[in-house]
Amino acid sequence: MKQVTAKEVENLINEGKRLNIIDVREVEEVATGKIPVAENIPLGLLEFRLHELDKSKEYTIVCHSGGRSALATQFLEGQGYKVINMLGGMLAWEGEVE
């Protein structure tokens, strides 16, 4: 499983890189703040929303602390997607939130 730190993700965003970030937390959790470019697809709905993802793109997966995003990363890898797990989740995120 490929992994990236929250700081590395923040640096890439600040450098103007266009990242595809999926936040797999529940809607109520995301309401407390998310990475501005992240799309919310709760872990429980991920398998039902695969048709919204593009296998030619790489996705960075985020959750609260890194556990659910690791599960989502493994699941998506098994489905043939290019994914990276963000270590530490939003607990490790020091960048901007919306």
Image: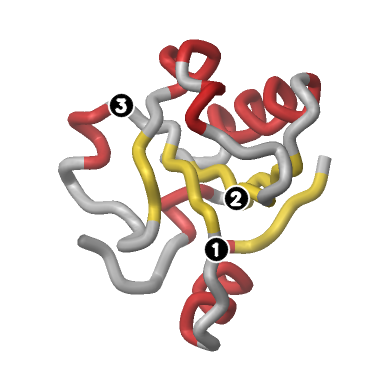
- The residue under label 3 is 26
- The residue under label 2 is 60
In contact (CB < 8 Å): disc 2 and disc 3: no
The three-letter amino acid code for the residue at tag 3 is: Glu
Residue 8 image point, x, y percent: 62, 72
- The residue under label 1 is 19
In contact (CB < 8 Å): disc 2 and disc 1: yes
Residue 64 image point, x, y percent: 42, 40
The image quarter containing residue 15 is: bottom right
The three-letter amino acid code for the residue at tag 1 is: Leu
* Local crowd size for mark 3, using a 10 Å CA cut-off: few (<14), some (14–19), many (≥20): some
* Lateral position of residue 94 relative to residue 54, left or right: left
Residue at horizontal 73 percent and vertical 34 percent from the top: 81
The residues bearing labels 2 and 3 have C-alpha atoms spaced at a distance of 17 Å
The residues bearing labels 1 and 3 have C-alpha atoms spaced at a distance of 21 Å
User: Could you tell which of marks 1 and 3 lies nearer the N-terminus?
Assistant: 1
Residue 18 image point, x, y percent: 53, 70
Identity of the residue furthest to the bottom in this view: 15
Which quarter shows the N terminus? top right
User: Could you tell which of marks 2 and 3 lies nearer the N-terminus?
Assistant: 3
Residue at horizontal 74 percent and vertical 52 percent from the top: 3
Residue 73 image point, x, y percent: 68, 33
* Local crowd size for mark 2, using a 10 Å CA cut-off: few (<14), some (14–19), many (≥20): many
* Lateral position of residue 26 relative to residue 66, left or right: left
Q: Which of label 2 and label 1 is nearer to you?
A: 1
